[in-house]
Image (cartoon, rainbow, N blue to C red):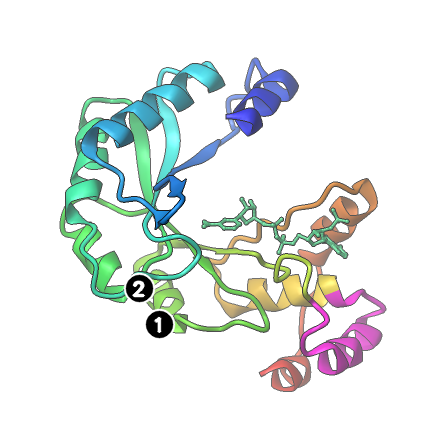
Amino acid sequence: MRANALIREALYPYPSDLIIATKVAPEYGPNGPTRATAADLRAAVEENLKTLGLERLDLVYLRIGYMEVPHGESLAEQFEVLANLREEGLIRHLGLSNVDTAHLAEARAIAPVVAVQNHFHIARRDEAAVLDACTENGIAFVPFFPLGGGRTDVNSERLARVAARHAATVSQIALAWLLALSPVTLAIPGTGSLAHLEENIAAGSITLTPEDLADLA
Ligand SMILES: NC(=O)c1ccc[n+]([C@@H]2O[C@H](COP(=O)([O-])OP(=O)(O)OC[C@H]3O[C@@H](n4cnc5c(N)ncnc54)[C@H](OP(=O)(O)O)[C@@H]3O)[C@@H](O)[C@H]2O)c1
């Protein structure tokens, strides 16, 4: 909730075109992640509304698992709770995080899904089928750790080669590669540096060539 306090301090009153995405997730206990109950999920949504100073949340992701995709685990019970909160008017749109294609299909049978946030970057391409499913269905795909949490050193030789061709940095190429994958991809690089923020925004203007994409494939 510290992030919400900072968002509110910096941006309230919110511009009408601002979309704030939030995520409700299992707590990480001493024995690993715990499964969120209906009461936990409702409380998390209400807490987000209160701390952000909103009457309705624009986008709420249901995160299942913790960093890794819990294959085979049903999300229906939890997603139904959020779908009901959406029906009540407390949430505008629903998203998912850390899911596979089976989870996505299970959720979409309950309520519309507008965004999926999964662990994905140039050096970690698991669950590419989720990206394909998002592209097919016009669902935003939001790779988390788009810069590998700061690990763009992986694949650095190829990245450096492409970066040199564009007079760009390897981080910019890692972001441009994500954006080139699909029109539904949104990049959310994190930074505490203004210079990096500007660099990351500029990465959105880099157009990779077929030769670049072949080098990075
Ligand atoms: N859904 C989930 O389960 C989940 C899990 C983890 C993260 N996330 C989300 O993913 C988003 C990104 O996470 P993240 O910030 O930890 O990872 P990230 O964006 O992959 O990497 C951030 C790291 O990259 C560095 N960096 C950023 N821009 C750079 C640039 N232009 N050149 C060189 N280094 C650069 C940052 O350092 P500087 O500060 O020095 O720039 C920081 O160390 C966040 O919104 C986070 O909430 C979601």
First of labels 1, 2 by sequence position: 2
Q: Quadrant of residue 141?
A: bottom left
How crowded is the residue under tag 2: few (<14 C-alpha within 10 Å), some, or many (20+)? many
C-alpha span from label 1 to label 2: 8 Å
- Percent across and percent down for residue 35 are 26, 44
Secondary element under disc 1, as helix, strand or loop, is helix
Q: Residue most toward the front? A: 30
Answer with left or right where residue 132 lies relative to residue 161: left
- Residue 102 location in percent, x, y? 22, 64
Amino acid under label 2?
A: Asp
Viewer-closest of 208 and 115: 115
Amino acid at dot 1: Ala
Magenta highlight range: 152-170
Whether residues under marks 1 and 2 lie with C-beta atoms below 8 angstroms apart, the answer is yes
Q: Is residue 172 magenta?
A: no
Q: Nearer the viewer, residue 217 or 210?
A: 217
What numbered label is drawn on residue 129?
Answer: 1
Where residue 79 sits, quadrant-wise, is top left
| Main secondary structure found in the magenta portion | helix
Q: From the viewer's perspective, is residue 191 above or below residue 17?
A: below
The answer to whether the residue bearing label 2 lies less than 8 angstroms from the nearest atom of ligand 1 is: no
Please name which of the two marks, 1 or 2, marks the residue nearer to the observer.
Answer: 2
Is residue 129 rendered to the left or right of residue 111?
right
Quadrant where the image shows the C terminus = bottom right
Frontmost residue, 189 versus 27 = 27
Which residue is denoted by mark 2 in the rendering? 100
Q: Going 38% across and 20% down the picture, which residue do you hit? A: 47
Left or right of 52, for residue 113: left
